[in-house]
Image: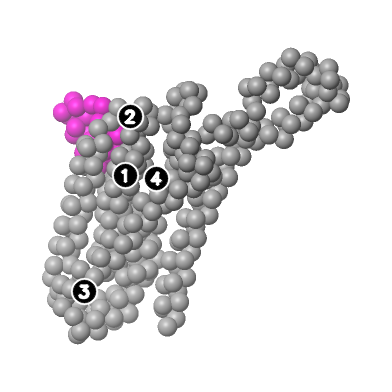
Amino acid sequence: MYKNVVLNKGLLLVVTFIVILIGYSFYEYFDFHFSYVKEYYEIIEKCGESGKSPDDKICKYINTDELVNKMKKNQNPIAKYKKLDAITLTCSIVEQTKFSTLQLLSPLIIIVCVALLVHRDFSTGMIQNYLTRMTYKKYICRQLKKIAVVSLLFPLCLLLIFLISCLLTKFNFSIDSMTTELAVYGTWKYNHFLIYGSIICLLQYLLSFAYGCIGFVCCKKNKNLLVSIIMGYVSSLAIVIFIYVFLYAIIINKILGIRELTDYFALSGYWFFDDSISLIGVVFVALLFSIIIYIITKISYKDKERTLLENEKQVA
């Protein structure tokens, strides 16, 4: 009973952290882009020849009716907000706010969720009790299904951000001309956003499944939950770094001389892309990565007797 309470609280904390992160990211965006609103209305009210207090410090540089009217025209926060579209808001939240920290934290979060779901079976020896009621193959399949469900976490987060963006912009998908000058803008991305967004969600699902499998392997290596989580996270980072530094930077780039493939092998950056990259290519890399990790996981759990023997050593 106590273990179930700890499990539920742990997963609830993870979900709460993600929700708070998303909420704060929206706050961060609007605080940055609309932080001038209070000052704007003070200038409109006070400054210029017809203002209430033209000698106020805030009117030092905007001291004529002409400048005040120009500010009204160019910086009206209401007009600016109405021009904001759902695609730009979604991309800005994912790429430019605190939400972007998930590029490094996503493996850890997935591994924590997986460890909370499966580690107890190994640390308490419950796996042996389960195997009296089901086959070993069925048990492993059940754990992999849990990982598959956990892997939906970040695709659902991306969908939530898009939904909130749609609600805040009143489902505005009309792109303002000024939007094309923003760093988040990409012609193909904006013109095919549903396809682009679906591919990003698929990429995050594949990577999350791979990270979950790594965590699953580490869960049987140590009876301490925290150690298993740290081991899984460090292993994930080591694999990602190995792929980028050794496989790409050294072999593909330096030895083979094939360049311009940085974004394809930077797995931690699979949250957004510009128009210069082939999304089919990154899907292939992510799929290959998840398949290889899945095969390693299956090999790690292939031998039932070995798994049980390792478990007996842990709980002894």
Is 109 on the left or on the right of 52, as rendered?
left
Question: In 3D space, how far apart are the residues under numbered discs 3 and 4 (Cα atoms)?
Answer: 32 Å
Query: Residue 202's x, y, as percent?
Result: 29, 48
Q: Hey, what amino acid is under mark 3? A: Tyr
- The Cα–Cα distance between marks 2 and 3, rounded to whole angstroms, is 44 Å
**Residue at point 28%, 31% (across, down):** 277
Give the residue type at disc 4.
Gln
Measure the C-alpha gap from mark 1 to mark 3: 31 Å
Q: Nearer the viewer, mark 2 or mark 4?
A: 2
Q: Which element type, helix, strand or loop, lies under badge 3? A: helix
> Within the magenta stretch, is there residue 255?
yes
Q: Quadrant of residue 215?
A: bottom left
The numbered mark, 3 or 4, whose residue comes first in the sequence reads: 4
The region drawn magenta spans 243-267
Amino acid type assigned to the residue bearing label 2 in the image: Trp
- State the mark number for residue 198: 1
Instruction: Identify the residue position indicated by label 3 in the image.
Output: 139
Query: Mark 2 or mark 1: which comes first in sequence?
Result: 2
